[in-house]
Amino acid sequence: MATLKDTKSHDMGLHEESLKGRTQQRFFSVDETSNLTYFNSFEVDTDKAATIDALEMTPREINIAIRELMESGVGSITVDNPMSRHGVGVGILNRLNLTFNDSLGYFGCGLIDGPNVHIKGRVGWSCAENMMAGTVLIEMNAGSTFGAAIRGGDLVCRGSVGARTGIDQKGGTIIVGGNTGAFSGFMMQRGRMIVCGDAGRNLGDSMYDGVIYVGGEVEELGIDCVPGEMTELDVRYLSSKLDLYGIKSPNGAEKMHKYVSGKMLWNYDKLEAHEKKVAL
Amino acid sequence: MCGIAGIIHKKGGASENIGAQMTDMLQALKHRGPDSTGYAVYGEDNGNQIMRLKVAEAIELEGSFSIHAEIAERIALVDSRLSEAGVKVVSKENSTEYSLRYELDFSGDMKKIADFIEDIEGVEILSVGNTLELIKDLGDASVVSSQYGLNDFNGTHAIGHTRMATESDIDIRSAHPYWAYPFSDIAVVHNGQLTNYWTNRRDLERKGNRFSSNCDSELIAVYIANKMSEGVDLETAMRESIDFLDGVFTYLVTTKDQLGMAKDCMAAKPMVVYEGDDMIALASEEVAIRKLFDHQIHTFDPYDGEVKVWQH
């Protein structure tokens, strides 16, 4: 099979100059099967299990150990004693059953695409940031910027979470069993956020799109966040989603409130005042 | 960035090795700020006043041939002024060449004594209190702890700080904690940036308050001290500080028997709290609290504008 090196890049003379930035792109061809696999992802068997004792390990060592197990085809990994360390369980791009028998620190399980993660303790700031697919389930509380910029998957916290939950959310679903802090859903662009308890100040501030459901009290709505109409579809969706994780909203799914973008900010209408007059 | 930590053992509990506990927590936060480390630790009350002071900056020792003689002169002057003010020195210890610990038998106007001592060039009082001892120096927690013998310090509560210098110099003067001059036993540590520091500093200076550094965090200590001088209790002063201070911040305050925490309206700076039956521990990161526990614990993040005060 021809390789990229032998054909396109040479044909284009790219090996005769120092390559930087966008010239690092990979040229796609369906004839090259290597292009059809996900870079840095592994074929794993979820029936093959292994345990890592992280008590004396650095975050880097924990991540390398997880990667080496995945490389060898292990599809169910349990990590004991992560001891609230930061940046653990990140960048996993294949299906995997990953269990942490303790709490994680900051940026745990960020940039993942596919694994099912179960964290039996608490997580610090920015858990699952930029998550693309899979499930992350946290048994206790979570810190601020929970699910920052997630693009897909289900991110679930049975307890309460800090401020700025789902900031810049671009997809997926964030579920909070307890309360969420101020500025949750800030600049949300797509996806769904379900908060069973109360929400702090400035909920959904400057949100572009997406839906936020709140079961308890909302301290204050943010700019351009407005109440939406709950439909039968919403209730069915909420009931099935919450049932999936065994989470109950205190007053039931039908009593939850829905919030959406009012789409009245400048970015939805770029016409200046005098231009509007002409257009009208 | 800076890292802050606090720990308070509930009343009735035995005196704990608070120095070693705080060292473990601060060492775990070293990555948040390696420039300097500071402790405000609360020990046993034997009726005397403990005064911690420095007579020079650590950095001065490297750049001057005459500094050793000057330090000796300053210490002699401190001794003579204490004597002149009628203060009985029960004990006197050097932790380093430039930092001293005095145990004083005195019950008069502490502000007057503090002003008299700080009038000596190069001398700064770090703390005065019945139980408070404020220790701060350059380096990480393990360095400062071994320098000042903190691993053997027993007490009831403490706060600490690892500093990444952003707004002011890397020196002891700008290191945390800050003593809430001239009040006995009150100290503050802070993580964040205060954007209305100069405006408020000038206002407080016009009211006669003293600032010893150009570090924005000192504003909190002075503000709390100023409020308490008006008879306001700690929790109320902290609640009012949320509106008074502009910027992003999380800070801790300790008194003789209390530990307080306040967070700005954006909840922009981190804080993780563990509330147990016997003790409360809080820090910028849970990884610091976990240095006290080998098992999973229940912790939470306080919300925006939240103030909490715990009693020993």
Image: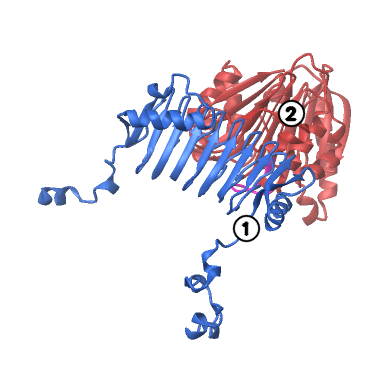
Chain colours: A blue, B red
- Residue drawn at x 65%, y 41% as measured from the top left: A105
Badge 2 vs badge 1, beta-carbon distance below 8 Å: no
Q: Position of residue B69 (x, y in %)?
A: 85, 48
Q: Chain of mark 2?
A: B
- Residue drawn at x 82%, y 56% as measured from the top left: B65
Q: Give yes or no for residue B166 being in the magenta stretch.
A: yes
Residue B254, located in which quarter of the rendered image? top right
Q: Give yes or no for residue A3 being in the magenta stretch.
A: no
Q: Position of residue B207 (x, y in %)?
A: 54, 27
**Is residue A36 among the parts visible in the rendering?**
yes
Mark 1, residues whose alpha carbon is within 10 Å: few (<14), some, or many (≥20)? many
Between B257 and B303, the one lying in front of the other is: B303
Report which residue position mark 1 lands on: A42
The stretch in magenta equals B162-170
Mark 2, residues whose alpha carbon is within 10 Å: few (<14), some, or many (≥20)? many
Secondary structure of residue under mark 1:
loop
Q: Main secondary structure of the magenta part?
A: loop
Q: Is residue B238 above or below residue A280?
A: above
Residue A205, located in which quarter of the rendered image? top left
Q: Amino acid at mark 2?
A: Ala
